[in-house]
Image (spheres, grey):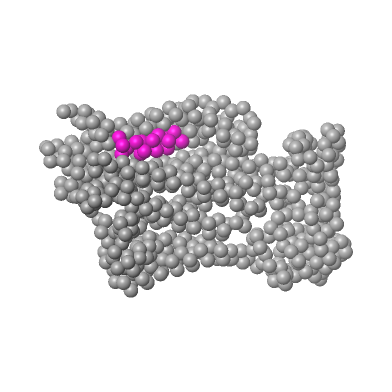
């Protein structure tokens, strides 16, 4: 029999093992090709303000996707070779050399990868337009885009194919050369036992796992101070190391306590669920830790991106409280602009805000992140004029409100600002701006009497603000604003509409790329857990035959297997979600609106992916058990 014929028969025989792996590869290649196509398409950049970032963003996405695919393929192949160890050993036993066996597996791998790559590229060509329309929808762009065939994308996808093929070929050769016949025949029985530890030491390590995670969670909610960077590193260390101890020691220790409380007499369902988990927990600890940590990071990034996108309008308004602003030197342009608005019958409200800049000293004032400020220049503006311009501000004489803090919550209980011997007691500090950020970063709002006193010893700068009444007319007003400055030397100030579009594009690109990358990553981790479970089912076939001889039914066995697999999928899912919750809580200050909706959506998608793989694993396990028992 020729080697190619042997390869063909092997692929047909092992199709039930490979089909999920094959479809996962096709989807990943399709997404990789689409990202590469968008990366090299110039027409997209022309339709987007931040055009230079489009190519960079998709390049980063392509790199991350390539890394995910490489790790997924290598780990999946390792599990496949473990399941097929006996088969590989038989080929050598009937006379094939190690090189011939390796060559057969390499050809098999070549066919799988080439097929997945060609189908993925073909589907990418078909669905690229749909993905692009979705991308434009997310960015709220109505421009006409003509997506063209990209030779660079084909070449880049080809390079990925060759990279995966090269690495998997090396992996195959190492597997064949490294293992003896005896090791191949016993590959399903290797390395699952656990090493007994002293009970006291095990109990201490189990407690440390919980304490480390708890401390990491606590620190994540109290890290906003001058040591922010070191606190972040500490959170990562304690959470990751605590997670490793949790999986390696704590969970198996708890399960061992359950078994000992039952005096070793576990029910049949527990014998097929708790006992195997105890037996395999240490060998799975690294895998669980890696999947849990990376899943939590992925979910946090995806949720954060969605939350930024969800709160774009509020974020933009916090930085640009006025639709349009003019400096004192732009008074002529301000008049021209308001005249154009009146001519187009666009409703608006214009106001003037006088400001003075002063060097000040500060007492008891923390701007956020533990950064105390003693002296700095700041801008003063009167309450009355800010109110007329649409800023909701109210205070008594001698009091002030500070705009432009670094952190979300600032304690101003004993904060006092002094300028020209004038003392102002701060009653509030806001993480937003009273004037558009392009004009002034920090503003202290004071009563009119205090402002007039400060005005006597400083030059006054007057700003004109214009706010459009109808939200739907802002786009037209924005075009008129920039047209006023088209023939004027120098740059015009950015507007709320400009900022909103820029933020929407950035957040939109982030959510589009991170959303699909997150889905691919979570699907890859779910697939790995699925392959791991199917490998364990393969290893336990002899046990099922024994149990059947003892009188247990298929349903009895499937019920126990289902509980074990539920634990297997639930543990990394639940702990990953818990990590994600505290991570989101720690960065909640970045968002000006409630992020409940994006968090619920992201968590739901994550959970559904794992539920899908759990159901798939249980369904195929049932088929395997029935096949073993001849049912």
Q: Is residue 338 above or below residue 228?
A: above
Which residue corresponds to the image point at 24% horizontal and 51% vertical from the top-left? 551
Residue 21 lies in quadrant = top left
Residue plotted at (59% across, 41% down): 508
Residue 17 is covered by the magenta coloring: yes
Dominant secondary structure of the residues highlighted in magenta in the image: helix
Residue 519: x percent and y percent? Answer: 47, 43
Q: Quadrant of the N terminus?
A: top left
Q: Is residue 413 toward the left or the right of residue 553 in the image?
A: right
Quadrant of the snapshot with the C terminus: top left
Is residue 420 in view? no
For this rendering, which residue is in front, 247 or 120?
247
Residue 110 among magenta residues: no
Which portion, as a residue range, is magenta? 15-31
Residue at 85% over, 67% down: 397
- Residue 606 image position (x, y, % from top left): 48, 47
* Residue 257 seen in the figure: yes
């Amino acid at each position: 029999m020729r080697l190619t014929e042997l390869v063909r028969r092997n692929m047909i025989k092992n199709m039930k093992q490979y089909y999920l792996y094959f479809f996962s590869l096709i989807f990943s290649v399709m997404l990789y090709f689409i990202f590469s196509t968008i990366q090299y398409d110039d027409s997209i950049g022309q339709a987007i303000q931040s055009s230079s970032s489009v190519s960079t963003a998709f390049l980063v996405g392509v790199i991350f996707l390539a890394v995910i695919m490489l790790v997924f393929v290598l780990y999946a192949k390792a599990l496949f070779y473990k399941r097929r160890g006996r088969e590989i050993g038989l080929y050598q036993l009937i006379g094939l050399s190690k090189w011939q066996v390796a060559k057969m597996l390499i050809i098999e791998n070549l066919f799988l990868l080439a097929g997945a790559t060609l189908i993925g590229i073909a589907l990418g060509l078909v669905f690229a337009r749909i993905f692009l329309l979705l991308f434009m929808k997310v960015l709220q762009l109505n421009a006409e885009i003509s997506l063209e065939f990209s030779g660079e994308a084909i070449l880049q996808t080809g390079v990925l194919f060759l990279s995966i093929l090269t690495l998997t070929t090396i992996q195959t050769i190492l597997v064949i050369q490294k293992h003896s016949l005896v090791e191949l025949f016993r590959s399903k029985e290797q390395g699952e036992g656990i090493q007994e530890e002293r009970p006291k030491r095990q109990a201490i390590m189990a407690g440390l796992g919980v304490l480390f995670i708890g401390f990491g969670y606590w620190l994540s909610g109290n890290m906003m101070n001058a040591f922010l960077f070191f606190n972040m590193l500490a959170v990562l260390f304690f959470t990751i190391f605590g997670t490793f101890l949790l999986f390696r020691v704590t969970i198996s220790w708890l399960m061992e306590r359950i078994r000992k409380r039952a005096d070793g007499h576990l029910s049949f369902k527990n014998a097929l669920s708790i006992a195997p988990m105890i037996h395999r927990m240490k060998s799975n600890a690294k895998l669980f830790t890696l999947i849990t940590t990376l899943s939590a990071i992925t979910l946090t990034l995806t949720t954060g991106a969605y939350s930024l996108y969800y709160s774009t309008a509020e974020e933009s308004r916090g930085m640009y409280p006025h639709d349009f602003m003019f400096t004192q030197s732009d008074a002529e342009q301000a008049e021209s602009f308001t005249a154009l608005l009146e001519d187009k019958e666009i409703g608006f409200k214009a106001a003037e805000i006088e400001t003075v800049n002063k060097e000040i000293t500060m007492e008891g004032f923390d701007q956020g992140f533990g950064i105390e400020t003693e002296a700095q220049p700041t801008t003063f503006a009167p309450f009355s004029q800010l109110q007329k311009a649409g800023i909701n501000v109210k205070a008594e004489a001698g009091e002030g409100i500070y705009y432009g803090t670094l952190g979300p919550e600032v304690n101003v209980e004993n904060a006092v600002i002094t300028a020209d011997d004038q003392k102002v007691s701060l009653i509030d500090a806001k993480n937003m701006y009273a004037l558009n950020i392009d004009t002034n970063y920090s503003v202290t709002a004071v009563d009119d009497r205090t402002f007039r006193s400060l005005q006597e010893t400083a030059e006054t700068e007057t700003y004109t603000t214009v706010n459009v009444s109808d939200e739907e007319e802002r786009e037209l007003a924005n075009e008129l604003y920039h047209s006023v400055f088209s023939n004027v030397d120098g740059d015009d100030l950015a507007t709320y509409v400009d900022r909103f579009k820029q933020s929407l594009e950035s957040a939109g690109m982030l959510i589009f790329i991170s959303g699909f990358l997150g889905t691919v990553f979570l699907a890859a981790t779910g697939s790995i857990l699925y392959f791991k479970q199917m490998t364990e089912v393969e290893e336990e076939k002899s046990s099922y035959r024994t149990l059947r001889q003892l009188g247990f039914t298929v349903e009895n066995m499937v019920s126990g297997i289902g509980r074990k697999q539920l634990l297997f999928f639930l543990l990394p899912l639940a702990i990953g979600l818990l990590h994600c919750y505290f991570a989101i809580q720690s960065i909640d200050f970045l968002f000006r609106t409630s992020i409940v909706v994006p968090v619920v959506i992201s968590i739901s998608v994550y959970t559904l992916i794992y539920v899908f793989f759990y159901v798939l694993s249980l369904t195929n396990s049932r088929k395997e058990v029935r096949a073993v028992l001849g049912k």
